[in-house]
Image (cartoon, grey):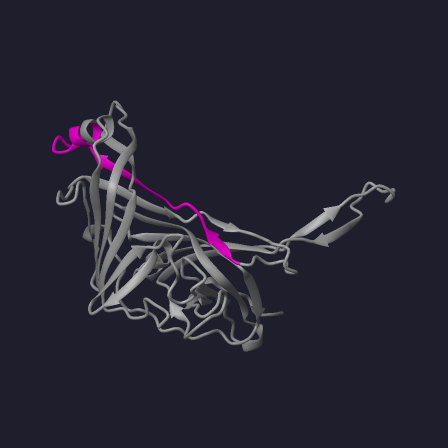
Amino acid sequence: MGYKYIGDSNQLCFQFESGAYASASGARQWIGLVQDHTAKEGVGVDPIRFQGNYSRNVGLFTDGKLEYTGKFTFYPQDWRFLSFAIGSCQVLTGSKIITESDSNASNYAVPAQILSSFTLEDSKKTASTGSNFIRTYKGCMVDTLKLTMKEGAIAACDIDYKAQQAVYSSGTVTSVTAIGSKPYMWSNTTIHLPSGTKLQNCIDYTLTIKNNLESRFPLNGSRTIETVIPLARDYDVKASFIMDSANASDLYNTYYIQGTSFNSMAELKSTNGSLYIVMSGCRITDMTVPSPVQGLQEQTCTIMPTSINANVYDSVGGYTAW
């Protein structure tokens, strides 16, 4: 009987890439308090039926596209993956400034790219080195980042990514130094709408950043993608509020019905630092205000910013490849 793989021996870590796409650089890094990782390996098995086979069965299989995607969920202790999703990070003394990168931008680590790429190592460890189950995904980029803040809950990040290749090993699991700080909590989160006005009644706030990555398979003699290409970027925020006379009218009438644009900010703090996500040129594009017969009344809306940047203040190093 062999070793069984148990969840408390799982580890997901990342590594910066630099110089070239899918080329890892430096040491493996701690992601955060990872809760789950699900990878999907599309091995491209294509069945073919054809005349002259004289059978109701598949005639043969061909090897098609190799497509690697995945999703992981974690409680953030730093905001490096937010910088992967938005684009560019400038490290200053005591702070980091995260700004957008567009199609005419050149990534500092891999000049031919718009966004930073990274390598993921997913490992299941046993008591025997030769029995470990390790998958390394190279050439990863953030397709979608979803940051969720709910009353009574830990701030959580969901990352959907695309990768170029996957490598299997049963060897040694990489040792990674954990970040010892506590995660970001709802109790230290505030929403400013518009900027400068701190709301007291937001109960659910989810920011989604979509890079709409496109995987292309040119005629280059390879079954894997050449690279992933970010297309048009989409932002949206889903927010719910306990209806309060202090802002119910403004949210509904001023910002939704009359269509007044505004700036907004999400402020998150922890024992290890703080994050300020600044959203400019916002419009409320959808709102529901149901009228149930019982309970507190709520408003739920969709906010669409035109641009986003973020300021981070923490003691965590390694926001960039060097």
Q: Is residue 170 magenta?
A: no
Q: Is residue 68 left or right of residue 30?
A: right
Q: Where does residue 102 sit, x and y in percent of width and height? A: 37, 52
Q: Is residue 24 left or right of residue 99?
A: right
Q: Toward the viewer: 255 or 177?
A: 255
- Is residue 56 depicted above or below 245 in this figure? below
Q: Where does residue 108 sit, x and y in percent of width and height? A: 37, 65
Res 133 quadrant in image: bottom right
User: Which quarter of the image is occupied by the C terminus?
Assistant: bottom left
Which residue corresponds to the image point at 82% horizontal and 40% vertical from the top-left?
A: 56
Q: Toward the viewer: 106 or 170?
A: 106
The answer, for residue 312, to whether it is visible in the render is yes
Q: Toward the viewer: 304 or 307?
A: 307
Q: Is residue 233 magenta?
A: yes
Which residue corresponds to the image point at 50% horizontal and 66% vertical from the top-left?
A: 22
Q: Toward the viewer: 29 or 82?
A: 82
The answer, for residue 77, to whether it is visible in the render is no
- Is residue 145 depicted above or below 270 in this figure? above
- Is residue 170 depicted above or below 306 in this figure? below
Q: Where does residue 47 sit, x and y in percent of width and height? A: 73, 47
Q: Which residues are magenta?
A: 227-252
User: Which quarter of the image is occupied by the N terminus?
Assistant: bottom right
- Is residue 192 depicted above or below 37 in this figure? above
Q: Is residue 45 left or right of residue 179?
A: right
Q: Where does residue 265 sit, x and y in percent of width and height? A: 21, 47
